[in-house]
Amino acid sequence: MWDSREVRSASLPDLIRMCAPLVKELEVTVLRQDATTPQGERRSSDAVPMMFRIGAAEVVDEITVVLRSILGAWVHEQKRPVFRMLTVPELVASLHPLRDWVVKHQDAEAWHDRLLEQCLAGLGQIDIAPERVFAGTCPSAGCGVELWPAIGEDVVVCPRCEVQVDVRARRREGLRRIEAYEAPLSRVVDTLRAAGEQITYEQARKWTTRRDAHDRVMLNAVGQDQRGTRLYRLGDVRAVMMRTTRRKARSLRA
Ligand SMILES: [Zn+2]
């Protein structure tokens, strides 16, 4: 894959050509991000926990939109109303013979800027190591760089303005905001783990049968989905997790 300097200096036809391999890489990234994103709620920004981002999928969508609008402009000028919904590789292939027309078009500069923005965003998505999690954007005024600390890292230094950000506080805040999130236990555990919490599915599953000192089950389901899978509230799982951790810390000190 190219670096951002190559992308920045690419001509519009080159940028279009780059979109095919870039989108292929992004599809892989989307799969990886899906693994840590509550399924079925990817498009609902209220429901998706803030530390997840569906960036790669959005970049693919955006690239598709730009390429379609370029080909659409050509089709429109040719007065040839045949315009199927092409995939990105098909769009790139269709636009290849139209290079000369593309660069001379009145919208060429706008297309170039939009594609450049998306290609750079796409590169950023691909570069993210799988063991990193999104912790929001840099809080410094006017910075806004995305912060991707490694799992377990408590402080992250902004790569642009070098401000230190307390990742733990941000995650706590993020998790508080999604306490009401209800999902199958494995997904709740995935969500907590991706947010940097140390919890295993095995542990959580034990809590669903284990009883506490008052003979109450430690973790109860709040309902079930259409397929009969039991749903747990993220806040409940996290509360049990924190009680257990505190107890463990106390017994270690004792
Ligand atoms: Zn910053």
Image: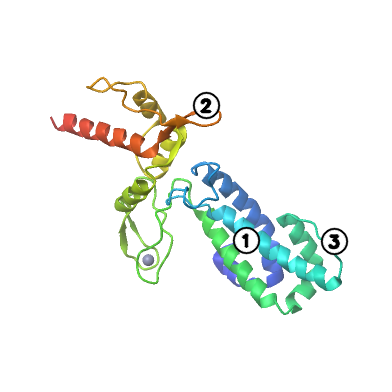
Q: Quadrant of residue 233?
A: top left
- Of the residues under marks 1 and 3, which one precedes in the sequence? 1
- Residue 146 lies, in percent from the top left, at 43, 60
Q: Secondary structure at mark 1?
A: helix
- Residue 151 lies, in percent from the top left, at 38, 46
Q: Which residue is mark 2?
A: 228
Q: Which mark is residue 62?
A: 1
- Residue 212 lies, in percent from the top left, at 26, 23
Q: Is residue 199 found left or right of 66 in the rendered image?
A: left
Cα separation, mark 1 vs mark 3, equals 22 Å
Cα separation, mark 3 vs mark 2, equals 46 Å
Is any part of residue 199 visible from this angle? yes
Crowding at label 2, few (<14), some or many (≥20) Cα neighbours within 10 Å?
few
Toward the viewer: 238 or 5?
A: 238
Q: Is residue 121 found left or right of 131 in the rendered image?
A: right
Toward the viewer: 211 or 54?
A: 211
Q: Which mark is residue 82?
A: 3
Would you place residue 90 above or below residue 223 in this image?
below
Badge nearest the viewer, 1 or 3:
3
Tell me the kind of residue under disc 2: Gly
